Image: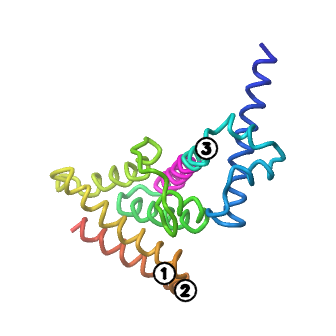
Amino acid sequence: MASKERIQRLKDETRTSILEAAYKIVKEEGWQALSMRKIADEIEYTAPIIYEYFSNKEAILAELNKKGYLYLAKEMEDARDKYKLPGEQLEAMWMAYWNFAFKKKELYQLMFGVSMNCCAAQKTPEAEAPARLVTDVIRQLLGKDAQSENEVCRRYYTLWSVVHGLISINLVNQGTSDEMNKQVLTDAIGGIINAMQS
């Protein structure tokens, strides 16, 4: 039994090494540089070994995409849990989303197709988790005014459009200063939250 566990542990470690190597290549050289051959060279394995764990490059991208959404949802959840009032929770979650986009820029590009093609849009629990966190708080904030899911959805997309748009501008064009961006972000989120509360 112990040898089976050891073999599984080694497989898990190799799989993790492949994903870490892929992400390292992307951070250093960009998404266009990623290939199965480069990953194999990075971890000092042969390419066929990589194919034992991932059928192709797209499978690696899908796994990194999933990990990105899990990481983002955790960051947003942690930010939410620091506050009791829904308005403050909502602002904190969007600031965590903003911070994630620049701390894990390459994952954000993959997840949302900024300056590249994003992973095939699939409705997975991981991909839906960040939106679910936000819409739950929007429902709390709207209270009895949340008369329909369309209203909650509209508020979510209003917020997401502003935040994602500003992030995209900065990732693609290196917009204005960080201080100016944070102020624009805070003003926009605060204005939308105030409109929901009134």
Classify residue 90 as left or right of residue 2. Answer: left
Q: Position of residue 103 (x, y in %)?
A: 61, 65
Q: Nearer the viewer, residue 40 or 76?
A: 40
Q: Nearer the viewer, residue 97 or 41?
A: 41
Residue where numbered disc 2 is placed: 177
- Helix, strand or loop under label 1: helix
- Numbered range of the magenta stretch: 64-81
Which numbered marker is on residue 181? 1
Query: Decide: marks 2, 1 in contact (CB < 8 A)?
Result: yes
Please say if 102 is above or below 62.
below
The residue at the point 67 percent across, 62 percent down is 33
Residue where numbered disc 3 is placed: 56
3 or 1: tag closer to the N-terminus: 3
Please say if 27 is above or below 146.
below
Which numbered marker is on residue 139? none
Classify residue 180 as left or right of residue 188. Answer: right
Name the residue type under label 3.
Answer: Asn
Name the residue type under label 2.
Answer: Ser
For the C terminus, the quadrant is: bottom left
Q: Position of residue 164 (x, y in %)?
A: 42, 68
The residue at the point 41 percent across, 65 percent down is 91
Separation of marks 3 and 1 at Cα, in angstroms: 38 Å
Q: Residues within 10 Å of mark 3 (few under 14, many from 20)?
A: few
For the N terminus, the quadrant is: top right
- Helix, strand or loop under label 3: loop
Q: Is residue 79 magenta?
A: yes
Please say if 118 is above or below 5.
below
